[in-house]
Image: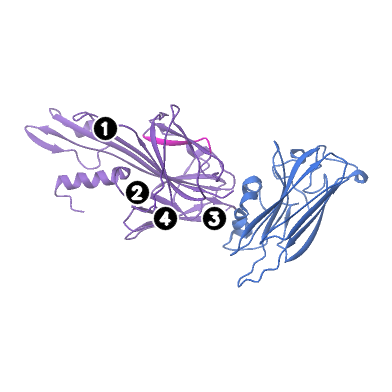
Amino acid sequence: MNLRNPMIAIAALAVVAAPAAYAHRAWLLPSSTIVSGTDNYVTVDAAASNEVFFFDHRPLVQIPTVFQPDGTEGKIENHAVGKFRATFDLHLTQQGTYRLSILNEGVVGSYKLNGETKQLPRGTTAATLAAAIPAGATDVTTSESIGRNETFITQGAPTNTVFKTSGRGIELVPVTHPNDLIVGEPATFQFMTDGKPGANLKVTAIQGGIRYRDALNPIDLKTDAQGKVVINWPGPGMYWLNVTPEGAPAAPGQPQRRLAYITTLEVLAP
Amino acid sequence: MQFRITGLTAAALGGAAFTPAANAQTLDLSVAIPKLTVAEYHRPYVAIWLEKEGVTPRTIAVWYDFDLKGSEGEGTKWLRDVRQWWRASGRSIAFPADGITGATRAPGTHKLNFTGGRGSMPNLTPGAYRLIVEAAREAGGREAVTLSFNWDGKTAVSASGKGAHELGAVSMTLKR
């Protein structure tokens, strides 16, 4: 990546930080979401593409955080980045639900100092923003993004320890457990924005296998006042779920904030 | 064979755990596994369980490769493919589960007898039940046959059903 041109650098960072805002859909695809036994591996593909779950564009290179049923953080194994996809393995040794989560966060922006426009350094986050803007800077513009890309895997019976929210960005709180989805049973999820019920969020579910049908058939929904949404699955399969805030961005000159949440869900036949 | 309670108690589905033998409930079950002419045949994993509205489903038998060793997770790895059972009951059982576990069975008609309050079979309180037999075959299909019956506690009741591809005739008689 050529970072000499600051505008290119910013554009590139923005793509990494907020994939949902762009045409390509980022996704994690586990080999299994429901697992029996006590000692198993699942392998996961991670990529961004137009046709969800077909890797034909870019790998997702970030290494996800593993939230384990017992509350500790786990590790992925065998991470490898290919031309079109990254892959990694997850060793399941505990009973219950695991959460794999890629968190992309950052702040891009610029300010004027002594008549010269400067870009915020790469890697600036909300936490380091204050230190990144020197005293005397004017015309500060910032755009913060927090994007999550997650999937869930359960060995044995589903558990809920991994759904503890951090209070930042959009997060999923199950009403229906994401590893207990069946055609014919409406699933309810609650989404939190910065730890509070995320009302009026746009929720889009797209079933995999786009290549083999003519219409995208997205399921477009909106969260209610409690941040809840009910999804009726049209058929079994893997689904890509994208959640973004509704509405126009902040006025020019005001700090911008872009939030996104993505998850891959498996729905079984009854 | 030892019987180990695996998170479900006898009271989950039935009433008192102990009934005098002379007056015991007996469940006679017949399960046919069809002979299939396929290039790669493996005996199916089969789960048999009881459901009643409002109570925890109760597995009374599961046939799988429990003595398989190695990379396949000692046979438990594919239990989730018996997917309706796995969700209803299997996933809350610790394996190996004594009292319900059996080896996979060859094609043919298998006669099973259960006595209420013994082993995996609870004493059934009166009510509407479903007995479900589900089979899933490696490199093959999956099918469940549901037998619905009402048990008044004393009158013998029979039910039967038939699978289309992974199971043949399934029938049961419950009496005391």
Sequence-earlier tag: 2 or 1: 2
Which chain's colour is blue? B
Q: Is residue A89 left or right of residue B38?
A: left
Residue A40: numbered disc: 3
Chain-order first, disc 2 or disc 4: 2
Q: Residue furthest front?
A: A214
What residue is shown with label 4? A213
Question: Which label's residue is closer to the chain start, 3 or 1?
Answer: 3
| Residue A86 visible to an observer of this rendering | yes
* Residue A25: percent from left, percent from top: 35, 48
Tag 4 or tag 3, which sits nearer the N-term? 3
Q: How far apart are marks 2 and 4 (CA)?
A: 18 Å
Residue B100's tag is: none
Camera-side residue: A138 or B171?
B171
| Percent of width and height locating residue A30 | 46, 53
The quadrant of the rendering that contains the N terminus of chain A is bottom left
Relative to residue A148, is residue B117 drawn left or right? right
To the question of a shared chain for discs 2 and 3, the answer is: yes
Q: Mark 4, mark 1: which one is toward the viewer?
A: 4
Q: Residue A25 carries which label?
A: 2
Which residue is at the front of the view, A112 or A73? A112
Locate residue A105, reporting x and y percent: 31, 40
Residue A171 in the magenta stretch? The answer is yes
Q: Quadrant of residue A261?
A: top left
Are the residues under marks 4 and 1 on the same chain? Answer: yes
- Residue at point 80%, 52% (across, down): B172
Mark 2–mark 3 distance (CA, rounded to whole Å): 29 Å
Element carrying mark 1? loop
